[in-house]
Amino acid sequence: MDWGAIFGNAAVELISPTTAAYALAALGLAVHFGYTGLLNFGQAGFMALGAYGYAISILTFGFPVWGAFLVGVGASVIFALILGIPTLRLRADYLAIVTIAAAEIVRLLFTTNTFAAVTGSANGLSGYKNEFAALNPLAEGSYGFGPFENNAYDTWLRIVAWSIVILAALFVWQIMRSPWGRVIKGIREDEDAVRALGKNVYAYKMQSLIFGGVLGTIAGMIFALPRAVVPSNYQTTLTFFIYAILLLGGAATVLGPIIGSMIFWVLLSFFSGFISRAVEAGWLPFMTAIQGGQLRFILVGLAIMLIVIFRPQGIFGNKKELAFVR
Amino acid sequence: MSDNAVSAAPLEPPVPTQKPIKTTGLHIGEAEPGCRKVDPILVVDGVRRTFGGLTAVNVNHVEVPRGAITALIGPNGAGKTTLFNLLTGFDKPDAGKWTFDGRSLAGVPAYRVARMGQIRTFQLTKALGLLTVMDNMLLGAKGQTGENMFRALMPFLWRNQEEENRAKALDLLTRFKLDTKKDDYAASLSGGQRKLLEMARALMSDPTLVMLDEPMAGVNPALTQSLLDHILNLKSQGMTVLFVEHDMHMVRHIADWVIVMAEGQVVAEGDPHEVMRNPAVIDAYLGQHHDEDIGEDQAAEAENVSAIKELLDDER
């Protein structure tokens, strides 16, 4: 058993762009669910809009990177408005139903053959990385050390991805300790009380939905850069993985989603490496390599269940808050 | 989760520690349902709200006098809370219009009603549990620069205002004896303290009309006294108070004017001492056929009988 390779591969995930993307998407959900109390089950839809908005802008329209970025953000603002206008006046559970359905509609629209010329249908899109790579100021070569050693493009991608995550985290941290954040947290507790104090609850919920959605969209772009954009990546399971990360780290925290994402990906990679090698070594005679690939999700699920049972407030959550949860 | 106030209930009914100064001469002409007031702050005209076949509120005309404490009483299901919800924009009537301070409020959303200076509290207290007591208070302040999403990112724009609000909140909390709890979660307060917090929070916006929905419900007698004093203080500070209450002693002690509702309508109005003798009020509480045995609703009936008895005892 090559423990070095298992741990090495797991460590790679600590700062991988995918981890950054999940962290950012989870931060968006923290704004929605943890701070505002909005049950958004369509974060995968926001991510898909970011990925496709970026890829289509570059491939079909030849936009520069910043233009493609703005297209993705604009698409998610419009998406948030469409979701929010009919549902934010209603009870919280309606938003949950609408968002989960809308995210599926988005994914199916990108999958359908009707728009294959633009969306690439089920095969998705690729070949949109050159514009981003062209912005790379790093010279050719290898950077970093040990498991964190990467070529110039991958290093550049990691720097950009984690810079965005850090900026977004500072942004969320600052805004949540401002009077705006106080209103947002008040809405989570009881929106009628906040309304009775003269705050336009509907507008605040809309702002929160757009803000968290845009974070999800940027996460979608980061997610798309190390791989191709394939519609099957944006299924509802993606949203639930992000929820798992959020609950793991602590719902109403800034650091929770980021550390949660790191733990999630490191664990996933570790179990994946461990199981495939265990199957090879014949430790699990009842199992094929393909079945082993599925087992890692079971083990991650188990690990998350244990954390939620024994530390229900998440890693960074405040234990005191939990004493009052109805 | 315990009151730091006295746990043993005093035997006597709670009375405010200060002798209330009653405001008189509020109405013009006979004290009858819908009578005109010398200086009304809230004028309601033809407000009707039905839930399916049930007419919950059907008020032809009623005026609430400015600068006085008005009690809205009536048996359970009379439509008091529904009327409250309609007047504050939390519910929409089927028909009718109403004005506050001369401005029409029909169709105005709840948050704008509150910004105009008409602040309400709720029957089931709505303290924001996972916010600190101080944050609850600060949320009540009006016109905060930092509540704009973009300005929120620039603390230098709102830091001074925040400090002023904080000082004001601390002052109010001291008056309501909650200052030692300012950094605790509101969820850790007792029921009575939450009522106090809700009232203090409402005062952060310097309202002109304070509407209290059953401020005494679930509050222990020791705390009731201080709540009564606080309500009287609102009047002495120039605010108008409209409150819904079931505790007849309290109504008698502090209200300057009483509006009685039954089955959605205003059935009587007047001075608290006079209005209790009104046959329409006795009918409202005991039912028009109170000499017949109806059989159903025995418990509610018994409750109403005790309310009337309480009143008559009080009258001596």
Image (tube, coloured by chain):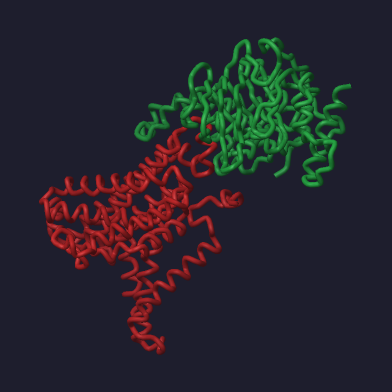
Chain colours: A red, B green
Picture coordinates of residue B240, whole percent (x, y): 62, 19
Count up the numbered dots: 0
Taking B27 as reference, is A259 left or right? left
Picture coordinates of residue A275, whole percent (x, y): 38, 79
Residue B283, by quadrant, is top right
Residue lying at the far left of the rendered structure = A62
Residue B229, by quadrant, is top right
Above or below, A267 against A199 in this view is: below
Above or below, B92 against A221 in this view is: above
Picture coordinates of residue A82, whole percent (x, y): 32, 46
Taking B261 as reference, is A36 left or right? left
Taking B100 as reference, is A213 left or right? left
Can residue A41 be seen? yes
From the viewer's side, name the closer residue of B306 and A20.
B306
From the viewer's side, name the closer residue of A262 and A144.
A262
From the viewer's side, name the closer residue of A247 and A13.
A247
Picture coordinates of residue B231, whole percent (x, y): 68, 23
From the viewer's side, name the closer residue of A293 and A279.
A293
Can residue B180 be seen? no
Residue found at x 60% / y 37%: B55
Residue found at x 47% / y 54%: A250
Residue found at x 34% / y 53%: A24
For the C terminus of chain B, the image quarter is top right
Residue found at x 62% / y 21%: B62
For the N terminus of chain B, the image quarter is top right
